Amino acid sequence: NAGVTQTPKFQVLKTGQSMTLQCAQDMNHNSMYWYRQDPGMGLRLIYYSASEGTTDKGEVPNGYNVSRLNKREFSLRLESAAPSQTSVYFCASSGDFGSGNTIYFGEGSWLTVV
Amino acid sequence: GDSVVQTEGQVLPSEGDSLIVNCSYETTQYPSLFWYVQYPGEGPQLHLKAMKANDKGRNKGFEAMYRKETTSFHLEKDSVQESDSAVYFCALSADTGFQKLVFGTGTRLLVSP
């Protein structure tokens, strides 16, 4: 009963390094999302993909890129990490509007940039 | 743009106390409203939802009424338990094509025994 799976769970990066967060869902959902969670700020949308082949910017896209590799997978890339990108990152997915609007989250990826 | 405001960053009731966690929203559209709960080390998970005005979401003794006239969706429970301790996020979704949540800043509920 995997749901949404993210890797890695923990990562420490040096400023300027690059890395990719991987996400996969096994619920046949069309829509996928990347959020970041920071203390006192709730969850903020970085990028989303309404369907396979499309991606769009969310509230805080600067410094990130995404790839919707196929219907199951949606990756988030940091090209040149900065300390301000230290955060907990959550991947999520949801079905179409008729499925009841529930968004399912992964367990999170803790990223520290030093 | 759309926004959700949670006024309490932390609430510290004792077991058996009643609870109200405030949530107000702002949007020009007709949103769906949600409460998500997050336990330590986990991602948020849907706690309850209401899709239209005057709907009441319910789950595990918690309730929230969708009040369009006051643009509010307060979370209430008559008697909290220690196991209710978690972070609660109010959220709205105003997209018609698919779900894109806007979250409040969260309220940490810590229930003492």
Image: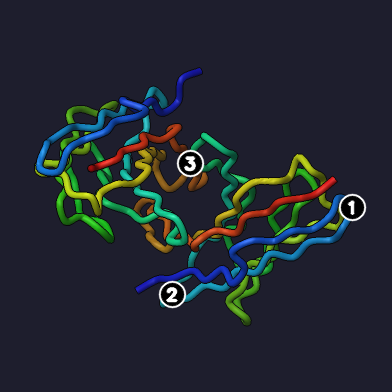
Q: Nearer the viewer, mark 3 or mark 1?
A: 1
Identify the residue at image location x=51%, y=18%.
A1
Answer yes or no: do the residues labelled 3 and 1 have beta carbons within 8 Å? Answer: no
Sequence-earlier tag: 1 or 2: 1
Of B89 and A8, the residue lying toward us: A8
The answer as to whether the residues below labels 3 and 1 share one chain is no
Give the number of the mark in front: 1 or 2: 1
Above/below status of A81 relative to B29? above
Question: Residue type at mark 2?
Answer: Thr
Residue that badge 1 annotates: B16
Q: Position of residue A53 (x, y in %)?
A: 16, 38
Give the secondary structure at mark 2.
loop
Label drawn at residue A99: 3
Task: Look at label 3 and name its amino acid.
Answer: Ser
Badge 3: residue crowd in 10 Å (few <14, some 14–19, many ≥20): few
Q: Amino acid at mark 1?
A: Gly
Image quadrant assignment for residue A73: top left
Q: Which residue shows up at 65% across the image and 69% down it?
A: B22
Task: State the CA–CA distance, disc 2 to disc 3.
Answer: 23 Å
The residue identified by callout 2 is B27
Mark closer to the observer (2, 3):
2
Q: Chain of mark 3?
A: A
> Going by the picture, which residue comes out furthest to the front?
A114
Q: Are marks 1 and 2 on the same chain?
A: yes
| Image-based side of A71 in relation to B103, left or right | left
For the residue labelled by badge 3, is the local secondary structure a helix, a strand or a loop?
helix
Q: Is residue A41 left or right of residue A68?
A: right
What chain does mark 1 sit on?
Answer: B
